[in-house]
Amino acid sequence: MKKKTTIYDIAAKLGLTAATVSRALNDNPKISKNTRQLVLGTAMEMNYEQNKVALALKSGKSYNVGVIVPRIDSNFFSSVIRGIEEELYPKGYHVIICQTNNQENIEIEKINSLLNVQVDGILMSISNANLEDNMGFNKLIRSKRTPLIFFDRKKDLKGVSSVTIDDFKGGYDATKHLIDQGCKRIAHLSNDRQFEIFNNRFLGYKQALLDNGIEFDESLVIETMSKVVEGRKSARALLDMDRPPDAIFSSSDFAALGALQEIKESGLEIPEDICIVGFSNEPFTKFMELTTISSVDQFPMEMGKVAAQVFLEEVSNTQDTKISKNIVLTPELIVRKSSLKHKEG
């Protein structure tokens, strides 16, 4: 077996001390730029590989970051992960991705696993709306000096940073757009409103109705999972009402797609009979063959990048006082065929 190159081999070749080579490889400012470049170039030529475990023990950092999401097979979460990686990889960090499938027990297991491998931080979108009530979670997070940053789905926990969008504004703007299109009986496909993001979208919807003189009707609000099949079921229930809605604002693009399919199969026209607006701006919304779907863009790439930046600030904090930030990004309504009866002035 070929012997691995060591810093002593590099030092011998360049006529430097092993300490100088080590400092150069670790980008020590005491070493001149020319020397650092010479050492790095020679290390590459000699196929030198740094011992990551030894570096972690020495620095107290593993340079691994955990990312926990409810599901990976959605453009939103995959885009957030991409933003996180693009921000952290150049800084030498590697991302460990975990999926919970919206199950609380798996969520806690993933947190445990990440802490056991000594990640430098955890960035997560929660699956359990009552996360702060879980004693295991509190013990895990607060007993370790491991930065935690929520993104998208969050809970307000003291000392925990978060990066979200203004979901209230997203719900308000979507509903106001439908009102501007002449819609007066607007239904809302909500999701579990124990989650702050879905409750805020609902509150934005409700406030837009009230601000524009439209009475809020609880019967037009249906809790719907973010699935196409669930959107179909909810749309069917709405169409079977004595007074069906003339518009639907969905907290999910997937539920909005299901609603669109059910409405079309019933023989109604979109947007002439019923307008539809979704939430998240999934790629399929703009590639629908006949009826593209209006949707609220959450800018997931930016959310991931900002969450990573918050982590970097926290992990570099040398003060005893823990810093925390709550950053709220601004969403944007993307208007497409599914809701556009006439151009807005």
Image: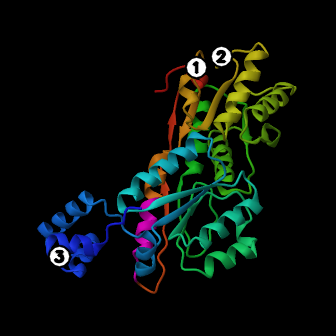
- Per the image, the residue denoted by label 3 is 31
Q: Nearer the viewer, residue 92 or 193?
A: 92
Q: Earlier in the sequence, mark 1 or mark 3?
A: 3
Query: Magenta span covers which residues?
Result: 308-318
- Per the image, the residue denoted by label 1 is 341
Which residue lies at the image location 62% right of the left edge and 61% below the top edge? 154
Which residue lies at the image location 68% right of the left edge and 50% below the top edge? 198
> Could you tell me how far apart the alpha carbons at marks 2 and 1 are, in whole angstroms?
7 Å
Is residue 317 located in the magenta-colored stretch of the structure? yes
Which three-letter amino acid code belongs to the residue tagged 1? Lys
* Label 2 secondary element: loop
Which residue lies at the image location 75% right of the left edge and 76% below the top edge? 135
Which residue lies at the image location 61% right of the left edge and 31% below the top edge? 178
Q: Quadrant of the N terminus?
A: bottom left
* Label 1 secondary element: loop
Residue 110: x %, y % from top left: 67, 63
Q: Which marked residue is nearer to the observer: mark 1 or mark 3? A: 3
Marking on residue 40 = none
Q: Nearer the viewer, residue 320 or 95?
A: 95
Which three-letter amino acid code belongs to the residue tagged 3? Ile
- Per the image, the residue denoted by label 2 is 272
Q: Is residue 42 above or below residue 135?
A: above
Residue 325: x %, y % from top left: 48, 68
Q: Is residue 194 above or below residue 147?
A: above
